[in-house]
Image: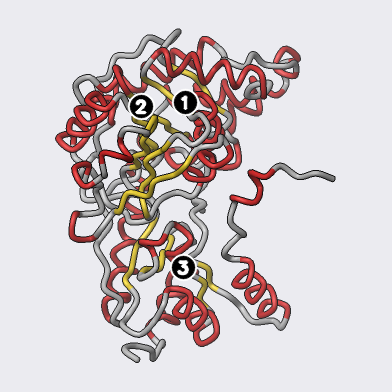
Amino acid sequence: MQFAKRLDRLPPYLFVDINRRIADLRSKGIDIVTFAIGDPDLPTPSHVIDRLCREAHVPANHRYPESDGLPELHEAIADWYKARFDVELDPDTEVLPLIGSKEGIGHIALCFVEQDKVVLVPDPGYPVYSMSTIIAGGVPYFVPLTEENAFLPDFESIPESVVSKATMMWLNYPNNPTGAGASLEFFERAVQFAKKNDILVCHDAPYTEVYFDGKKPPSFMQAEGAKDIGVEFHSLSKTYHMTGWRIGMVVGNKDAIRALFTVKSNLDSGIPQAIQLAAVEALTGSQSIVGEHNAIFQRRRDKLVKVLQDIGLRTRVPDGGFYVWAKVPEGYSCVDLTRELLEQVHVAVTPGIGYGARGENYIRFSITLSDDRLDEGIRRLSSWRGGVR
């Protein structure tokens, strides 16, 4: 067999060793509390499930769906953006449903990235941004997100030699893994930078509805001129706890939307219609579940942040999302600390290096485990006797 050379550019999965050790401990009957997975434990709203069950009995929903999605779903997405962000979208040309936002994030590089072209990627950041760039033949340039700059990119620090080759830029707020938020003023600076340099902005926004202290995050689409140079990816996974349903959307610049549809229509067969109609139910039905769930996540956030600070892990209180980003103590690497917590107190976390070189000094905790497991994890963390080496 002759394998494509692009596979050589994809790094090995970092967590193989850690996952192997977790499996080994569990095989010995040791209970592991895992803060490593960002998959919400709270249930999908019952009215959404009920709609899926009804639609599953409709024979027309068993056939191949159209790649661009049902008109009802396009309308529901546009209406949701209007109600939530006061953003006007043309349902026909500025909205495209996706088989989960990850699918669109992976495919859009095929639309805009030529061989050796540059994509500006946040570091730390969601690994798919750089992996999709590599698969498309491009070169990721890692833009540092530092604590000193509130985990926002400094556009002026990017070398002109890099900017001149860049075709795309990724942003993600509320941010995974840092939990940082971004203001509308920041998004407007991003629009100005992108327009000046003819760069497509791709904002990954699945956590806008997971926010704390009543501070609703803005959409990139609210920035003046955003639709001229950008698109925003969103998902029903985090808002309505539908991660396994695989449904999301991209909105914004109509030319970029059309390009992505061209790729999709040649590679996939669309989202099952019953799931699309259940998504319509989620978007147009009661949104009270958002506030209810956020109250639970905020309570979990506060409990976890307190114990981390008590045991000496400096932590920035997250603005939104499912994650707490904690700095490792002096003398540790993130992998060292991950292994020590696993071995000593049987708690699994995610080493920050998995999100880029700038994550080396951090570990990530998820708050998507049940309250009883969270409390058990906190009890175990409080018994950890690590610290400065």
Instruction: Determine crowd level at label 3: few under 14, some 14-19, many 20+ residues with C-alpha closer than 10 A.
Output: many
Towards the viewer: 51 or 189: 189
User: Judging from the image, what secondary structure is the residue with disc 3 in?
Assistant: strand
User: Any mark on residue 200, and which?
Assistant: 2
In the rendered structure, which disc, 1 or 3, sits on the residue that comes first in sequence?
1
Position of the N terminus, as image quadrant, is top right
Write down the residue under mark 3.
351
Quadrant of res 62: top right
Q: Which residue does the image show at 59% across and 50% down from the upper left?
A: 9
Mark 1 or 3: the one toward you: 1
How is the model colour-coded? secondary structure
Name the spot of residue 373 as percent of width and height, x first.
49, 69
Q: How many marks?
A: 3
Name the spot of residue 146 as percent of width and height, x first.
25, 58
In the rendered structure, which disc, 3 or 2, sits on the residue that comes first in sequence?
2
Write down the residue under mark 1.
112
* Residue at the right extreme of this rendering: 1
In the rendered structure, which disc, 2 or 1, sits on the residue that comes first in sequence?
1
Residue type highlighted by circle 1:
Phe
- Left or right, 148 with respect to 117, comes to left
Towards the viewer: 372 or 238: 238
